[in-house]
Image (tube, rainbow, N blue to C red):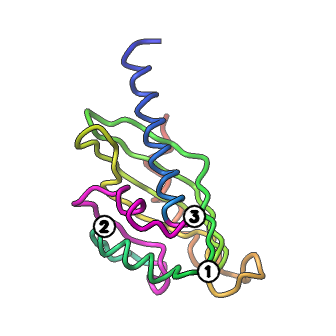
Amino acid sequence: MSVARVEDLLEIEAIKQLKARYCLGVDGKDWPLFRSCFADDARLGGGLPDGGAGAPDFVGPDEWVAAVAATVGSVKTLHTVHASIVEITGPGRARGLWQYTQRGWGRTGGYYSEEYTKPGESWRIASMRITPIFANPGDDETECTPGSFAAVADLWPPLIAPWLTP
Protein backbone atom coordinates (compact mmCIF):
# COMPACT_ATOMS: atom_id res chain seq x y z
CA MET A 1 0.00 0.00 0.00
CA SER A 2 1.40 3.39 -0.96
CA VAL A 3 2.22 6.10 1.55
CA ALA A 4 -0.40 8.35 -0.10
CA ARG A 5 -3.08 5.67 0.36
CA VAL A 6 -2.16 5.22 4.03
CA GLU A 7 -2.39 9.00 4.50
CA ASP A 8 -5.84 9.01 2.85
CA LEU A 9 -7.00 6.28 5.24
CA LEU A 10 -5.81 8.33 8.23
CA GLU A 11 -7.67 11.37 6.90
CA ILE A 12 -10.84 9.32 6.34
CA GLU A 13 -10.64 8.05 9.92
CA ALA A 14 -10.33 11.65 11.14
CA ILE A 15 -13.49 12.55 9.18
CA LYS A 16 -15.32 9.58 10.73
CA GLN A 17 -14.34 10.83 14.18
CA LEU A 18 -15.58 14.31 13.22
CA LYS A 19 -18.97 12.80 12.38
CA ALA A 20 -18.99 10.93 15.71
CA ARG A 21 -18.35 14.26 17.52
CA TYR A 22 -21.25 15.76 15.54
CA CYS A 23 -23.57 13.04 16.90
CA LEU A 24 -22.18 13.30 20.43
CA GLY A 25 -22.56 17.08 20.37
CA VAL A 26 -26.22 17.05 19.35
CA ASP A 27 -27.21 14.13 21.61
CA GLY A 28 -25.29 15.55 24.57
CA LYS A 29 -26.70 19.05 23.94
CA ASP A 30 -23.08 20.23 23.87
CA TRP A 31 -23.63 23.10 21.47
CA PRO A 32 -20.00 24.37 21.47
CA LEU A 33 -18.83 20.85 20.52
CA PHE A 34 -21.57 20.60 17.88
CA ARG A 35 -20.65 24.02 16.44
CA SER A 36 -16.95 23.07 16.31
CA CYS A 37 -17.79 20.41 13.71
CA PHE A 38 -18.56 23.04 11.06
CA ALA A 39 -16.39 25.36 9.00
CA ASP A 40 -17.22 29.01 9.61
CA ASP A 41 -18.55 29.38 6.04
CA ALA A 42 -20.42 26.04 6.01
CA ARG A 43 -23.80 25.75 4.25
CA LEU A 44 -26.18 23.36 5.99
CA GLY A 45 -29.75 22.30 5.31
CA GLY A 46 -32.48 19.70 5.35
CA GLY A 47 -33.83 17.31 7.92
CA LEU A 48 -35.44 19.72 10.37
CA PRO A 49 -39.21 19.84 10.88
CA ASP A 50 -41.17 22.06 8.51
CA GLY A 51 -38.47 21.64 5.88
CA GLY A 52 -40.68 19.36 3.81
CA ALA A 53 -39.36 16.90 1.25
CA GLY A 54 -38.32 19.59 -1.23
CA ALA A 55 -35.11 21.53 -1.47
CA PRO A 56 -34.00 22.71 1.97
CA ASP A 57 -33.02 26.23 2.87
CA PHE A 58 -29.29 26.35 3.53
CA VAL A 59 -28.00 28.32 6.47
CA GLY A 60 -24.70 29.04 8.15
CA PRO A 61 -23.36 27.07 11.10
CA ASP A 62 -24.51 29.46 13.83
CA GLU A 63 -28.07 29.47 12.46
CA TRP A 64 -27.94 25.68 12.08
CA VAL A 65 -26.82 25.08 15.66
CA ALA A 66 -29.53 27.42 16.97
CA ALA A 67 -32.20 25.69 14.85
CA VAL A 68 -31.13 22.21 15.96
CA ALA A 69 -30.98 23.31 19.61
CA ALA A 70 -34.48 24.77 19.34
CA THR A 71 -35.80 21.64 17.60
CA VAL A 72 -34.47 19.01 19.99
CA GLY A 73 -34.63 21.19 23.12
CA SER A 74 -34.18 19.03 26.18
CA VAL A 75 -35.55 15.89 24.47
CA LYS A 76 -33.25 12.90 24.73
CA THR A 77 -32.03 12.02 21.25
CA LEU A 78 -29.87 9.30 19.76
CA HIS A 79 -28.21 9.86 16.39
CA THR A 80 -26.36 7.03 14.71
CA VAL A 81 -24.46 7.17 11.44
CA HIS A 82 -23.36 4.12 9.52
CA ALA A 83 -22.62 2.66 6.08
CA SER A 84 -20.45 5.62 5.18
CA ILE A 85 -18.59 6.34 1.98
CA VAL A 86 -15.85 8.93 2.53
CA GLU A 87 -13.54 10.02 -0.27
CA ILE A 88 -10.59 12.39 -0.30
CA THR A 89 -11.17 14.65 -3.32
CA GLY A 90 -8.10 16.86 -3.11
CA PRO A 91 -5.72 18.49 -0.68
CA GLY A 92 -7.80 19.44 2.36
CA ARG A 93 -11.05 18.44 0.59
CA ALA A 94 -13.30 15.39 0.93
CA ARG A 95 -16.89 14.28 0.54
CA GLY A 96 -19.03 11.77 2.35
CA LEU A 97 -22.36 10.01 2.30
CA TRP A 98 -23.73 8.55 5.54
CA GLN A 99 -26.87 6.64 6.38
CA TYR A 100 -28.39 7.83 9.63
CA THR A 101 -31.09 6.95 12.10
CA GLN A 102 -32.37 9.22 14.81
CA ARG A 103 -34.60 8.76 17.81
CA GLY A 104 -35.96 11.45 20.08
CA TRP A 105 -38.46 13.75 18.42
CA GLY A 106 -39.58 10.76 16.38
CA ARG A 107 -37.89 7.98 14.50
CA THR A 108 -36.20 9.18 11.34
CA GLY A 109 -33.65 7.87 8.93
CA GLY A 110 -32.02 8.91 5.72
CA TYR A 111 -28.77 10.30 4.42
CA TYR A 112 -26.23 12.97 5.18
CA SER A 113 -24.47 14.15 2.02
CA GLU A 114 -21.46 16.21 3.05
CA GLU A 115 -18.33 17.98 1.89
CA TYR A 116 -15.40 18.56 4.21
CA THR A 117 -12.56 21.00 4.42
CA LYS A 118 -9.36 20.94 6.41
CA PRO A 119 -8.41 24.59 6.96
CA GLY A 120 -5.72 23.73 9.51
CA GLU A 121 -5.05 20.57 11.45
CA SER A 122 -8.68 19.42 11.80
CA TRP A 123 -11.43 18.49 9.36
CA ARG A 124 -14.69 20.45 9.40
CA ILE A 125 -18.03 20.00 7.65
CA ALA A 126 -18.13 22.54 4.79
CA SER A 127 -21.57 21.59 3.46
CA MET A 128 -24.24 19.21 4.61
CA ARG A 129 -27.61 18.21 3.23
CA ILE A 130 -29.82 15.93 5.26
CA THR A 131 -32.30 13.94 3.21
CA PRO A 132 -34.83 12.09 5.36
CA ILE A 133 -35.96 8.95 3.55
CA PHE A 134 -37.82 7.46 6.48
CA ALA A 135 -39.33 10.34 8.41
CA ASN A 136 -41.96 10.16 11.09
CA PRO A 137 -41.21 13.01 13.52
CA GLY A 138 -44.71 13.20 14.97
CA ASP A 139 -45.12 9.70 16.37
CA ASP A 140 -42.41 7.92 18.32
CA GLU A 141 -44.43 4.71 18.66
CA THR A 142 -44.74 3.59 15.06
CA GLU A 143 -42.14 2.69 12.50
CA CYS A 144 -43.60 4.52 9.53
CA THR A 145 -47.01 5.70 8.43
CA PRO A 146 -48.44 4.06 5.29
CA GLY A 147 -47.29 5.85 2.16
CA SER A 148 -44.66 7.97 3.89
CA PHE A 149 -41.77 6.29 2.08
CA ALA A 150 -43.50 6.72 -1.27
CA ALA A 151 -43.65 10.46 -0.66
CA VAL A 152 -39.84 10.74 -0.58
CA ALA A 153 -38.76 7.78 -2.73
CA ASP A 154 -38.03 10.05 -5.71
CA LEU A 155 -35.32 11.79 -3.65
CA TRP A 156 -33.27 8.60 -3.54
CA PRO A 157 -31.91 8.29 -7.16
CA PRO A 158 -30.30 11.75 -7.43
CA LEU A 159 -28.94 11.47 -3.89
CA ILE A 160 -27.06 8.23 -4.47
CA ALA A 161 -26.17 8.67 -8.18
CA PRO A 162 -22.77 10.33 -7.54
CA TRP A 163 -21.78 7.39 -5.33
CA LEU A 164 -22.67 4.51 -7.65
CA THR A 165 -19.33 4.32 -9.44
CA PRO A 166 -16.39 2.93 -7.45
* In this view, 166 is above or below 6: below
Label 3, label 1: how far apart the Cα atoms are: 15 Å
Range of magenta residues = 26-53
Q: Earlier in the sequence, mark 3 or mark 1?
A: 1
* In this view, 115 is above or below 46: above
**Residue at figure coordinates x 61%, y 82% from the top left:** 137
Is residue 162 found left or right of 27 in the rendered image?
A: left
SS at circle 1: loop
Name the residue that disc number 3 marks: 110
Q: Position of residue 109 (x, y in %)?
A: 61, 66
Q: Position of residue 108 (x, y in %)?
A: 62, 72
Within-10-Å neighbours for mark 1: few <14, some 14–19, many 20+: some
Q: Is there CB contact under 8 Å for labels 3 and 2?
A: no
Q: Nearer the viewer, residue 132 or 92?
A: 92
SS at circle 2: helix
Within-10-Å neighbours for mark 2: few <14, some 14–19, many 20+: many
Task: Indicate the amino acid at tag 3.
Answer: Gly
Name the front one of labels 3 and 1.
Answer: 1
Q: Is 38 included in the stretch rendered in magenta?
A: yes
Q: Is there CB contact under 8 Å for labels 2 and 1?
A: no
**Residue at figure coordinates x 77%, y 82% from the top left:** 141
Name the residue that disc number 1 marks: 105
Q: Nearer the viewer, residue 164 or 136?
A: 136
**Residue at figure coordinates x 49%, y 82% from the top left:** 71
Name the residue that disc number 2 marks: 61
